[in-house]
Amino acid sequence: MRDLITKTNNTIDEPLVIKKLREEIKEKEILLLDFTEKIDQLKIDLVVIKQEYNIKVGRLYLQLDQLDLDITKLLQIRKLISQGYTLKEAQEILNTQTKDEQEKINKQNESIDEDTEEQKSTHELSDEEESELKILYKKLVKKFHPDLALDLNEKKEREIKMQKINEAYKQKDLEQLKYLEKHYGHSPDQEYSFESLKQLLDEINKAISRLENDYDELTKTEWFEFKTRLKSARKNKRDLFAELEEKILKDIAQKKTKQTELSSLINEN
């Protein structure tokens, strides 16, 4: 290969060099597309797991946070009343002091509401439709992957297209993917010189390297670790979400009892 590259000015050898270069690009292109699909699917899996966790468990933890905040306020209200403040004055003071914490809890609840709505918007597909979705997604990624274009304008256009393709794939919107395939048509054929082919190969190798780093980072996240725990629990026929829910609900019941007791003490005064 090295000997052939040194003879790029030779019209007899150059076509063979280009042929070998195109073959190498094709192999790396397959690797790039497979890696892209693998990472995109992992990202989707982690988002789904995060949403399911927030909806089933996260909201319960927020109830605990709210109860902890309410109990803290009640304890402080009792203290202020003992110092001569009226109940109304004590409540106003504590509401001001805990405003930031309350807003934080409210925002987290709003975020979980958004997760719930997004989960509802995800399309339910049959096994056959799921298979069709994946095949169509691979086809579109192969056509419009930004790293398979050298022209900057073409790259930008492909990035915009891929955002819409990825969103439709994430939502399991088969009809939208079909529409995008029809709407986008085919990516323009690009004629590459020998130097351009070498540049393209270099770009693809860099993209693969970035994807390897991205995948490595994803495997270090808390949601990947939870995905591993979830998989292990299901393998052992355990419902990890149900186990977490049961534990948190017991804590909630205990804190509600304490909250009721404190409220009664304050009302007695």
Image (cartoon, helix red, strand yellow):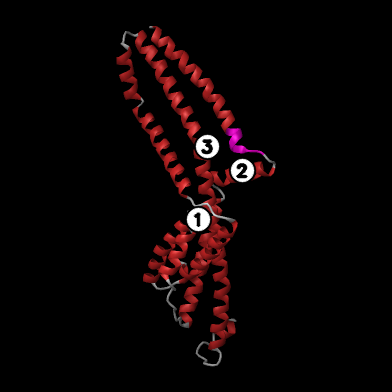
Identify which amino acid the numbered label 3 is placed on.
Lys
Residue 244 visible in the shown view? yes
**Mark 1 or 2 closer to N-term?**
1
Mark 1, secondary structure of its residue: loop
Instruction: Between residue 93 and residue 258, name the one nearer to us.
Output: 258
Cα separation, mark 3 vs mark 2, equals 14 Å
Mark pair 1, 2: CA separation:
22 Å
Vertical relation: 6 (above or below) 246: below
Q: Which residue is mark 3?
A: 56
Amino acid type of the residue that numbered disc 1 sits on in the rendered structure = Lys
Q: Is residue 5 visible?
A: no
Labels 3, 2: front one = 3
Q: Is residue 193 left or right of residue 4?
A: left
The residue closer to the viewer here, 203 or 87, is: 87
The residue under label 2 is 230
Residue 90 screen position, x and y as percent: 33, 15
Identify the residue at image location x=50%, y=71%. 202
* 113 vs 213, nearest the viewer: 113
Q: What residue lies at 42% left-to-right and 14% top-to-bottom?
A: 263
Magenta part of the protein: which range?
238-244
Mark 1 / mark 3, whichever is N-terminal: 3
The kind of secondary structure the magenta stretch mainly shows is helix
